[in-house]
Image: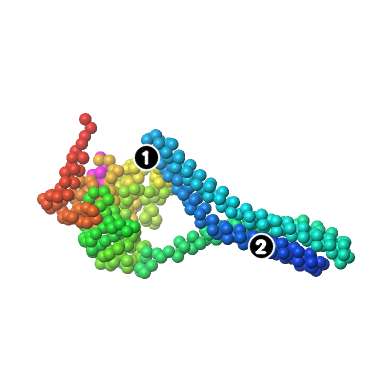
Amino acid sequence: MKMVDAVVNGYIQVAVILLCVAFFCPPAALAALIGVLVSAFALRGIGRQSARTAPVSHRAQEALSGAAIEYIHGLPVVKSFGQDGVSVQRFREACRANKAIRIKNEFGFVPWNCLHLFALRAASVGLVLTAGWQALAGALPLQYFLMIALFSFTIFGSVEAINDAAHILSVTDSVLDRLEELEQTDFIDKGGKEVVPERFDVALSHVSFGYGGREVLHDVSFTAPQGTTTAIVGPSGSGKSTICNLVARFYDVNAGSVSVGGHDVREFTCESLLRNISMVFQTVYLFHDTVENNIKFGCPDATHEQVVAAAKAACCHDFISALPNGYDTVIGEGGSTLSGGEKQRISIARAMLKNAPIVILDEATASVDPENEHLIQQALSALTKGKTILTIAHRLATIQSADQILVVEDGRIVQRGTHDELMAQGGLYRRFIEIREQAEGWRLA
């Protein structure tokens, strides 16, 4: 708003002074007006140039920011592999590219800036010369000429810097266009409504889905009855996490349907759907806040006693109590002050506290040490009793206790059944279990 005020006030000031000059010496006012019009034309050129270059500058700035963030986040890996030069080189290339684009853009403004300032200087000179000519001709009294001459030094001072304002306003306009584009993006739940399902079974019916034209799920169908545990196993990249993401409606299917309690997830608003789902991701993110507030994130109204109960069930109460301020300890952004296992157990406590009827666990025990793993399994069994559980797992303890196991390979369900049934069948599942048993049986000599 300050920039807009500067532009408006500057031209109002010039208009008022020119009207006063026109009252005493119309030819001088006309000479100055011509310069102002040329200046306005130059400002319009600056605006158009800014509109053309702003998107390019923004993309270069985004690339530079991305390179800087990648460099900072990857420092431990860079140092451990001794690749400082390679990593820094990418950042420097982004800096050079950003610098080159900015210099090129600035050169594009030079002609318009020069025209703008030249027009105003010429208008000042024209104002004095015309008024002097009128004074010599006897058409303008000397005192009026002196007044106009003094005005000529200050009349355009308020609009000389408007070229910067015009540039900034055009850049702002480009940013607002981008924001408007984002705001006009259709929400995934545009046609959804508040749905309260009476039961909480999960079903996929002939689901196909792909990212960027590459199909990763092909005609997937299964039902996870309410109150049961369904384990999804398979090689990396087979589509396990994608199935869970579709249940939570992070994406919409390309074909088929996903339903919760007999309702297609597309009937729900995202809020009403996710109200029924707790998720524990393989990669845990914790906020720069207290431990208690991180656990309460999914249930802000929970009491301290409920938080402690969830923490005990997730086997994280002991290490939380050992922190400097216990549950009031502020952890770093992303949980940087905690180990991977500690972060994952806090994430499990968060999901338990939410107490949603459907729980999705994406390798929920991946970072839990063997000593506490069986306690976590017992806690999950007790606190998720009566809930529908979808779990992506590689740990034998998680898989063997599931009511139903789905074996996914190349985006298709190739086997399904209980642990004993699948072991009897042989095939991919049996090979997978044998490999896991061998891996978990390894010991250091």
Label 1 sits on a secondary structure element that is: loop
Q: Are marks 2 and 1 in contact (CB under 8 Å)?
A: no
Residue most extreme to the left: 424
Residue at screen point 51% across, 48% down: 98
Q: Position of residue 39 (x, y in %)?
A: 68, 60
Q: What is the number of the mark on residue 52?
A: none
Tell me which numbered mark, 2 or 1, is placed earlier along the sequence.
2
Count neighbours of disc 2 (C-alpha within 10 A) and say few if under 14, some if 14 to 19, many if 20 or more: many
What's the mark number on residue 40? Answer: 2
Q: From the viewer's perspective, is residue 78 above or below residue 183?
A: above
Q: Mark 2: which secondary structure?
A: helix
- At label 1, which amino acid type do we have? Ala
Q: Magenta residues, as a range?
A: 371-378
Which quadrant holds residue 319? top left
Q: Residue at x 54, y 58 (%)?
A: 52
Task: Give the image location of residue 285, x and y in percent.
Answer: 38, 48
Name the residue furthest top.
445
- Where does the C terminus fall, quadrant-wise? top left
Q: Residue at x 23, y 46 (%)?
A: 395
Label at residue 322: 1
Residue 329 % position (x, y): 42, 44
- In this rendering, position of residue 334 left or right of residue 278: right
